[in-house]
Amino acid sequence: MPKVLISDKMSPLAEQVFKERGLDVDYKPGLDKDELAAIIAKYDGLAVRSSTKVTPKILDAAKNLKVIGRAGIGVDNIDVAAATNSGVVVMNTPFGNSITTAEHALAMLMALARQIPQANASTHEGKWEKSKFMGVELTGKTLGLIGCGNIGSIVAERALGLRMKVLAYDPYLSVERAADLGVTKVDLDELLSRADFITLHTPLTDQTRGLIGKQAFARMKDGVRIVNCARGGLVDEAALLEALDGGKVAGAALDVFAEEPATANPLFGHERVICTPHLGAATTEAQVNVARQVAEQMADFLLTGGVMNALNMPSLSAEEAPRLKPYMALADEIGSFAGQLTETGLKRVVVEYEGHVAGLNTKPLTAAILCGLLSPLMDSVNMVNAPVIAKERNIDLTEVSHDREGDYHTLIRLTVETEKRTRTVSGTLFSNQAPRLVEVNGVRLEAELAPHMLYVVNDDKPGFIGALGSLLGQNGVNIATFALGRREEGEEAVALVAVDDALRDIVLDQVAALAHVRQVKRLSF
Ligand SMILES: NC(=O)C1=CN([C@@H]2O[C@H](COP(=O)(O)OP(=O)(O)OC[C@H]3O[C@@H](n4cnc5c(N)ncnc54)[C@H](O)[C@@H]3O)[C@@H](O)[C@H]2O)C=CC1
Ligand SMILES: O=C(O)C(=O)COP(=O)(O)O
C-alpha cells in the first residue's frame, strides 16, 4: 500500500481520509529539514501546509515520492520546478480556504480602520484612551485590490457590500469579469494613486516579489492603509517601515512576512502595524476543507492515477482514470516504439487522435506518449517531467484531434521527425481494451507488443520470411507472434516478431546479414 507522510499541522481529517482509503499514513508535524530528509525516502506521498520547505535536497532524498499535496493555496514553499524535474506531481486545494482568507483580510481592514488591536491593548491596561483611537469610515472609501483571483474576488464582493468603491489591478482579469464583480479594472499606477486602502491577493512569483516597494509607496495617497494577507515577499518591509515613519502610510495590517516563522521583524513593535501569525487560513471550516480535499486528491492519485488540481500535470478525474487506462497503455507503447527506433535528435512530434479517443481527455495521453518516446533516450522520465523535458529540448509538439473515424473507430497516430528522418506509428484498441499497433511508417500491419520483440525492415522479396523463420529456429528462438506488412509488392516491408526470450546480439547480427534486410532492432515493452 502507498505510504504518506503529513509533515505539517493538519486537521485529523486528513489522516482519517488516508486511512479510510487504505493508505499507510504517518503524522509527524514539526520535523526539521534534516529529519525530513532522513525519512522521506519511505514515502509515496507528502502532505504539507506552509511550514515544510520542499527543497531540491528533500526531493533528491525522496526516492519513492510521487505526489506532494498542499493543504492550502500558495506553493511558494515547494520547489515546483525541481519537483517536476524529479517527476513528482504537486497539487494544491485552490478553493478550500479562500473564503476564510478573504474574511481575514476584511477583518484586518476593519481592525486597521478602527485600530482595534491597539485600543484593545490600551483598554486592558486600564488607560481608557477614548480620544487617541480616532478611526476612519470604510463607506465611500476606495479599496485597491492587487490580484483579483479567487480570494481577491471574494474580498471585492464583501467590500462592495460595505459600500466601498473597488478598483482592481490584475493583468489577467478580463473586463467582463470585472464588470460582473462590479469592480473597476485599472492599471497599477492608477490603483496606487487613487486607493485609500490597498489589499494584496497575488501569488508570490518572480514578477510579484517586492511589487510594493519604495517607488510604489511614492505613488500612493498620503494616509493610505495597506493589508497583506497574501505573501510577505510582495511588500518590501524596509520600504514599508520608511513609508510609515514618513507619514505616507497611516497603517498596515500584515498576516504574512518575508521570513516565516517571523519571530523578529523590523515592523514588530510599530504602533501603527497590526500583525497576525499567518492566520489567513486558520478557521475550523477552512482547515477541514483543505485537509479532506488534499487527502482525497492524493489518495485518488496514488490509488487510481486520477489527477486533480495539479500544478505540473494535466487533470484526470478518478472517474476518467480507469476509462483512459487502456489508452494510456497504448500511448506509452506507441511512444516507446518510436523512441526505441530513434537514433538522432528529436525535432518535431505530432500526435493525432482520431475517432473515439478524440472525445476523451487527451492531455494525459500526450504526456504518456512523450514519456514513452523519451524513456529509451534518457533516464528518469515520467509523465510529469516528459512535457517539460520535451520543451527544454526544443522539441516542437503539435496535437491534432479528428472526431470523425478513419479505418478504425479509434486511433492514435504519432509522427516523429528526427534530424535524419520522419517516422510514423499508429495504434488502436481492440474491444476498447487491447492495444494493437496497426501502422509503422505507412506500412499496415497488426501487432501486439510484447516484452521481447524483433523489428526488421526489409525489401519485400520471395523467401525472406522463410529465411528469417529458419534463422530464428536454428538459434533456438521461439516465435510467439509474427506480424507482417508491406507498402507495395516488392517495396519496403516490416516484420514485428514477438519471441519468448531476450534476443542475443549474435542473433541480431545474423538477421542483419540476411539478404534484403535494411534495418534490425531489438525492442522491449
Ligand atoms: N494568509 C494566508 O493564510 C493565505 C494566503 N494565501 C495567498 O493568497 C494568494 C492569492 O490566492 P488566490 O486568490 O486563491 O489565488 P488566485 O490564483 O485565484 O488569484 C491570484 C490572482 O493574482 C493575479 N496576479 C498574478 N500575477 C499578478 C501581478 N503581477 N499583478 C497583479 N495580479 C497578479 C492572478 O491573475 C490571479 O487572478 C495565494 O497565492 C496565497 O499566496 C492564500 C490562502 C491563505
Ligand atoms: O493556503 C495558503 O496559501 C496559505 O498561506 C495558508 O497557509 P497555512 O496552511 O495556514 O500555513
Image: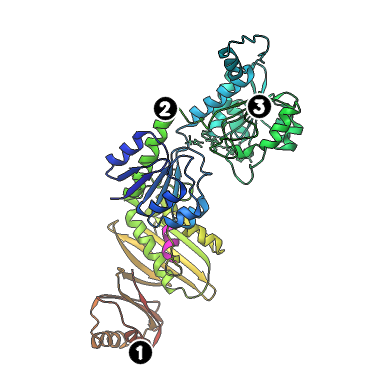
Q: Would residue 409 be seen by someone viewing this image from the given angle? A: no
Percent of width and height locating residue 356: 37, 53
Residue name at image x 64 percent, y 10 percent: 129
Asked whether, in this view, residue 456 is left or right of residue 117, the answer is left
Residue name at image x 71 percent, y 28 percent: 244
Asked whether, in this view, residue 299 is left or right of residue 248, the answer is left
Residue name at image x 65 percent, y 36 percent: 235
N-terminal of the two: label 1 or label 3?
A: 3
Q: Which segment is the magenta one? A: 367-373
Q: What is the secondary structure assignment of the residue under circle 3?
A: loop
Residue 207 in the magenta stretch? The answer is no
Which residue is under mark 3?
Answer: 270
Query: Which numbered disc covers residue 514?
Result: 1
Query: Which numbered disc covers residue 285?
Result: 2
Give how far apart the Cα atoms at labels 1 and 2 are. Answer: 73 Å
Query: Which numbered disc covers residue 14?
Result: none
Q: What is the secondary structure assignment of the residue under circle 2?
A: helix
Percent of width and height locating residue 25: 32, 44
Q: Callout 3 environment at 10 Å: few (<14), some (14 to 19), or many (20+)?
A: some
Under mark 1, the amino acid is Leu
Q: Main secondary structure of the magenta part?
A: helix
Percent of width and height locating residue 300: 34, 45
User: Quick check: which quadrant has ligand 1?
Assistant: top right
